Protein backbone atom coordinates (compact mmCIF):
# COMPACT_ATOMS: atom_id res chain seq x y z
CA UNK A 1 0.00 0.00 0.00
CA UNK A 2 1.34 3.44 -0.96
CA UNK A 3 0.01 6.65 0.62
CA UNK A 4 0.87 10.27 -0.17
CA UNK A 5 0.24 13.14 2.29
CA UNK A 6 0.44 16.89 1.66
CA UNK A 7 0.35 19.83 4.08
CA UNK A 8 0.23 23.36 2.64
CA UNK A 9 -1.63 25.06 5.49
CA UNK A 10 1.26 27.14 6.89
CA UNK A 11 4.41 28.84 5.59
CA UNK A 12 6.07 25.43 5.80
CA UNK A 13 5.25 23.05 2.95
CA UNK A 14 5.42 19.38 3.96
CA UNK A 15 5.11 16.24 1.83
CA UNK A 16 5.43 12.59 2.90
CA UNK A 17 4.79 9.18 1.38
CA UNK A 18 4.60 5.75 2.96
CA UNK A 19 5.15 2.46 1.09
CA UNK A 20 5.43 -1.01 2.59
CA UNK A 21 6.18 0.38 6.05
CA UNK A 22 8.82 2.88 4.87
CA UNK A 23 8.20 6.64 5.13
CA UNK A 24 9.97 9.45 3.26
CA UNK A 25 9.34 13.15 3.83
CA UNK A 26 10.44 16.53 2.50
CA UNK A 27 9.70 20.11 3.56
CA UNK A 28 10.53 23.65 2.55
CA UNK A 29 9.95 27.06 4.14
CA UNK A 30 8.23 30.04 2.57
CA UNK A 31 4.56 30.43 1.70
CA UNK A 32 5.36 31.85 -1.74
CA UNK A 33 7.22 28.64 -2.64
CA UNK A 34 4.32 26.22 -2.17
CA UNK A 35 3.01 26.17 -5.74
CA UNK A 36 6.48 25.88 -7.28
CA UNK A 37 7.94 23.33 -4.86
CA UNK A 38 5.01 20.99 -4.18
CA UNK A 39 5.40 18.60 -7.11
CA UNK A 40 9.22 18.55 -7.03
CA UNK A 41 8.95 17.50 -3.36
CA UNK A 42 6.46 14.79 -4.29
CA UNK A 43 8.87 13.54 -6.96
CA UNK A 44 11.68 13.51 -4.36
CA UNK A 45 9.79 11.34 -1.86
CA UNK A 46 8.67 9.01 -4.65
CA UNK A 47 12.28 8.71 -5.78
CA UNK A 48 13.41 7.77 -2.26
CA UNK A 49 10.75 5.08 -1.97
CA UNK A 50 11.07 3.83 -5.53
CA UNK A 51 7.48 4.51 -6.56
CA UNK A 52 5.43 6.84 -8.75
CA UNK A 53 1.97 8.41 -8.77
CA UNK A 54 0.27 5.37 -10.40
CA UNK A 55 1.39 3.32 -7.36
CA UNK A 56 -0.47 5.57 -4.89
CA UNK A 57 -3.76 4.26 -3.51
CA UNK A 58 -4.30 6.82 -0.72
CA UNK A 59 -4.00 10.62 -0.84
CA UNK A 60 -4.24 12.75 2.32
CA UNK A 61 -4.43 16.53 2.61
CA UNK A 62 -4.31 18.73 5.71
CA UNK A 63 -7.36 20.96 6.02
CA UNK A 64 -7.68 24.37 7.64
CA UNK A 65 -7.84 26.60 9.40
CA UNK A 66 -4.66 27.99 7.94
CA UNK A 67 -3.09 30.13 5.24
CA UNK A 68 -5.73 31.05 2.66
CA UNK A 69 -3.31 30.80 -0.26
CA UNK A 70 -1.74 27.62 1.10
CA UNK A 71 -5.13 25.96 1.44
CA UNK A 72 -5.96 26.85 -2.16
CA UNK A 73 -2.67 25.38 -3.41
CA UNK A 74 -3.30 22.14 -1.51
CA UNK A 75 -6.92 21.86 -2.64
CA UNK A 76 -6.01 22.48 -6.29
CA UNK A 77 -3.23 19.89 -6.15
CA UNK A 78 -5.51 17.31 -4.54
CA UNK A 79 -8.20 17.78 -7.18
CA UNK A 80 -5.66 17.62 -10.00
CA UNK A 81 -4.18 14.39 -8.63
CA UNK A 82 -7.60 12.77 -8.26
CA UNK A 83 -8.54 13.75 -11.81
CA UNK A 84 -5.35 12.10 -13.02
CA UNK A 85 -6.06 9.02 -10.90
CA UNK A 86 -9.79 8.76 -10.08
CA UNK A 87 -9.38 5.57 -8.03
CA UNK A 88 -7.48 7.36 -5.25
CA UNK A 89 -8.93 7.10 -1.75
CA UNK A 90 -8.81 10.69 -0.45
CA UNK A 91 -8.58 11.69 3.23
CA UNK A 92 -8.35 14.94 5.16
CA UNK A 93 -7.79 16.17 8.73
CA UNK A 94 -7.68 19.59 10.35
CA UNK A 95 -4.14 20.91 10.56
CA UNK A 96 -4.79 21.38 14.30
CA UNK A 97 -5.30 17.62 14.65
CA UNK A 98 -2.20 17.02 12.51
CA UNK A 99 -0.15 19.26 14.84
CA UNK A 100 -1.43 17.32 17.85
CA UNK A 101 -0.59 13.99 16.22
CA UNK A 102 2.94 15.16 15.53
CA UNK A 103 3.76 15.75 19.21
CA UNK A 104 1.52 13.29 21.10
CA UNK A 105 3.65 10.89 23.15
CA UNK A 106 3.33 7.12 23.01
CA UNK A 107 0.74 5.94 25.47
CA UNK A 108 -1.64 8.81 24.79
CA UNK A 109 -2.13 12.41 25.85
CA UNK A 110 -4.64 15.21 25.79
CA UNK A 111 -3.22 17.92 23.49
CA UNK A 112 -4.44 21.52 23.26
CA UNK A 113 -3.50 23.22 19.98
CA UNK A 114 -3.54 26.99 19.50
CA UNK A 115 -2.68 28.98 16.35
CA UNK A 116 -2.95 32.65 15.47
CA UNK A 117 -6.10 33.87 13.72
CA UNK A 118 -4.91 37.51 13.68
CA UNK A 119 -6.97 40.45 14.96
CA UNK A 120 -6.38 39.36 18.57
CA UNK A 121 -8.06 35.98 18.06
CA UNK A 122 -6.86 32.38 17.88
CA UNK A 123 -7.92 29.02 16.51
CA UNK A 124 -8.00 26.36 19.19
CA UNK A 125 -8.78 22.64 19.39
CA UNK A 126 -8.17 19.87 21.91
CA UNK A 127 -7.65 16.18 21.16
CA UNK A 128 -7.07 13.06 23.19
CA UNK A 129 -4.73 10.91 21.14
CA UNK A 130 -3.66 7.32 21.62
CA UNK A 131 -2.11 6.55 18.25
CA UNK A 132 -2.49 4.34 16.33
CA UNK A 133 -5.61 3.30 18.19
CA UNK A 134 -7.82 6.34 18.70
CA UNK A 135 -8.29 10.10 18.34
CA UNK A 136 -11.01 11.78 20.36
CA UNK A 137 -11.95 15.38 19.54
CA UNK A 138 -12.47 17.01 22.94
CA UNK A 139 -12.83 20.53 21.55
CA UNK A 140 -13.32 20.95 17.77
CA UNK A 141 -11.46 23.74 15.92
CA UNK A 142 -12.92 27.02 17.12
CA UNK A 143 -12.26 30.71 16.50
CA UNK A 144 -11.89 32.19 19.97
CA UNK A 145 -9.79 34.40 22.27
CA UNK A 146 -6.97 33.24 24.60
CA UNK A 147 -8.92 34.01 27.77
CA UNK A 148 -11.60 31.49 26.82
CA UNK A 149 -9.04 28.68 27.22
CA UNK A 150 -7.94 29.40 30.76
CA UNK A 151 -10.09 26.59 32.16
CA UNK A 152 -9.07 23.95 29.60
CA UNK A 153 -7.58 20.69 30.87
CA UNK A 154 -4.72 19.23 28.82
CA UNK A 155 -1.40 17.44 29.15
CA UNK A 156 0.41 19.38 26.46
CA UNK A 157 0.06 22.75 24.73
CA UNK A 158 1.06 23.20 21.08
CA UNK A 159 1.12 26.88 20.18
CA UNK A 160 1.86 28.85 17.02
CA UNK A 161 0.79 32.34 18.05
CA UNK A 162 2.29 35.61 19.37
CA UNK A 163 4.68 35.09 22.29
CA UNK A 164 2.52 37.07 24.70
CA UNK A 165 -0.46 34.78 24.01
CA UNK A 166 1.61 31.60 24.19
CA UNK A 167 3.43 32.48 27.40
CA UNK A 168 0.25 33.59 29.15
CA UNK A 169 -1.57 30.39 28.22
CA UNK A 170 1.33 28.16 29.23
CA UNK A 171 1.57 29.89 32.62
CA UNK A 172 -2.16 29.68 33.25
CA UNK A 173 -2.47 26.03 32.27
CA UNK A 174 0.85 24.97 33.85
CA UNK A 175 1.54 22.30 31.22
CA UNK A 176 4.49 21.60 28.90
CA UNK A 177 4.66 23.80 25.81
CA UNK A 178 5.66 22.91 22.24
CA UNK A 179 6.35 25.87 19.96
CA UNK A 180 8.23 26.57 16.75
CA UNK A 181 8.91 23.98 14.03
CA UNK A 182 8.12 20.89 16.18
CA UNK A 183 4.56 22.20 16.58
CA UNK A 184 3.91 22.80 12.88
CA UNK A 185 1.76 20.31 10.96
CA UNK A 186 3.75 17.68 9.07
CA UNK A 187 2.67 15.36 6.30
CA UNK A 188 4.16 12.36 8.09
CA UNK A 189 1.92 13.06 11.12
CA UNK A 190 -1.05 13.23 8.75
CA UNK A 191 -0.17 9.74 7.51
CA UNK A 192 -0.39 8.52 11.11
CA UNK A 193 -4.03 9.66 11.24
CA UNK A 194 -5.18 7.56 8.30
CA UNK A 195 -7.78 4.89 9.12
CA UNK A 196 -7.51 5.68 12.85
CA UNK A 197 -10.92 5.88 14.60
CA UNK A 198 -11.66 9.57 15.12
CA UNK A 199 -8.66 10.59 12.98
CA UNK A 200 -8.62 11.67 9.33
CA UNK A 201 -11.93 11.72 7.45
CA UNK A 202 -12.42 10.02 4.10
CA UNK A 203 -13.78 12.44 1.50
CA UNK A 204 -16.66 11.51 -0.75
CA UNK A 205 -17.32 14.35 -3.19
CA UNK A 206 -13.74 15.47 -3.86
CA UNK A 207 -14.71 17.85 -6.67
CA UNK A 208 -17.22 19.64 -4.46
CA UNK A 209 -14.94 19.76 -1.43
CA UNK A 210 -13.55 23.07 -0.16
CA UNK A 211 -11.07 23.68 2.67
CA UNK A 212 -12.11 25.11 6.02
CA UNK A 213 -10.67 28.60 5.80
CA UNK A 214 -11.66 29.63 9.30
CA UNK A 215 -12.15 33.23 8.27
CA UNK A 216 -11.81 35.46 5.22
CA UNK A 217 -8.44 36.32 3.72
CA UNK A 218 -7.05 39.67 4.90
CA UNK A 219 -7.15 41.03 1.33
CA UNK A 220 -10.89 40.32 1.20
CA UNK A 221 -11.48 41.99 4.55
CA UNK A 222 -9.74 45.15 3.30
CA UNK A 223 -11.63 45.06 -0.02
CA UNK A 224 -15.01 44.75 1.66
CA UNK A 225 -14.17 47.55 4.11
CA UNK A 226 -13.15 49.82 1.24
CA UNK A 227 -16.16 49.02 -0.98
CA UNK A 228 -18.85 48.57 1.65
CA UNK A 229 -20.16 45.27 0.32
CA UNK A 230 -19.26 41.57 0.66
CA UNK A 231 -17.56 39.37 -1.88
CA UNK A 232 -18.53 35.75 -2.35
CA UNK A 233 -16.39 33.65 -0.01
CA UNK A 234 -16.36 29.85 0.56
CA UNK A 235 -15.68 30.30 4.30
CA UNK A 236 -19.17 31.78 4.67
CA UNK A 237 -20.81 28.75 3.06
CA UNK A 238 -22.25 25.93 5.09
CA UNK A 239 -20.05 23.08 3.90
Image (tube, rainbow, N blue to C red):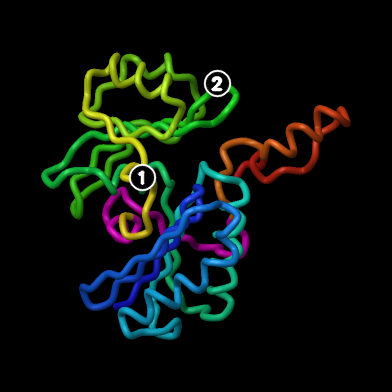
Q: Position of residue 107 (x, y in %)?
A: 11, 44
Label 2: few (<14), some (14–19) or many (≥20) C-alpha neighbours in 10 Å: few
In depth, the one of 12 and 73 nearer the eye is 12
Note whether 127 is above or below 120 in the view shown: below
Note whether 178 is above or below 37 in the view shown: above
In depth, the one of 91 and 157 nearer the eye is 157
In depth, the one of 29 and 92 nearer the eye is 29
Does residue 194 belong to the magenta stretch?
yes
Q: Position of residue 198 (x, y in %)?
A: 31, 48
Of callouts 1 and 2, which one flags the residue occurring earlier in the amino acid sequence? 2
Q: Residue at x 25, y 22 (%)?
A: 153
Note whether 187 is above or below 111 in the view shown: below
In depth, the one of 93 and 53 nearer the eye is 53
| Foreground label between 1 and 2 | 1
Q: Residue at x 56, y 50 (%)?
A: 211
Does residue 213 belong to the magenta stretch?
no
**Residue 85 shows which numbered tag?**
none
Point out the stretch of residues depicted in magenta.
190-209
Label 1: few (<14), some (14–19) or many (≥20) C-alpha neighbours in 10 Å: few
Quarter placement of the N terminus: bottom left
Cα gap from disc 1 to disc 2, whole angstroms? 22 Å
Note whether 67 is above or below 3 in the view shown: above
**Residue 120 shows which numbered tag?**
2
* Residue at the spot of label 1: 181
Q: Position of residue 99 (x, y in %)?
A: 35, 44
Q: Residue at x 38, y 45 (%)?
A: 184
Amino acid sequence: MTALAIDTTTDRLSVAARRDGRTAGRACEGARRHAAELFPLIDAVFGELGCALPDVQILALSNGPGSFTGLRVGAAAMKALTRAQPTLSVWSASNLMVRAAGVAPHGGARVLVVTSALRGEIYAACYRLDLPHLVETVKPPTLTVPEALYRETADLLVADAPDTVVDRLADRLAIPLVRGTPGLPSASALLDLLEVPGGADRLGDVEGWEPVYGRMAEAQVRWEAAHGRPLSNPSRDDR
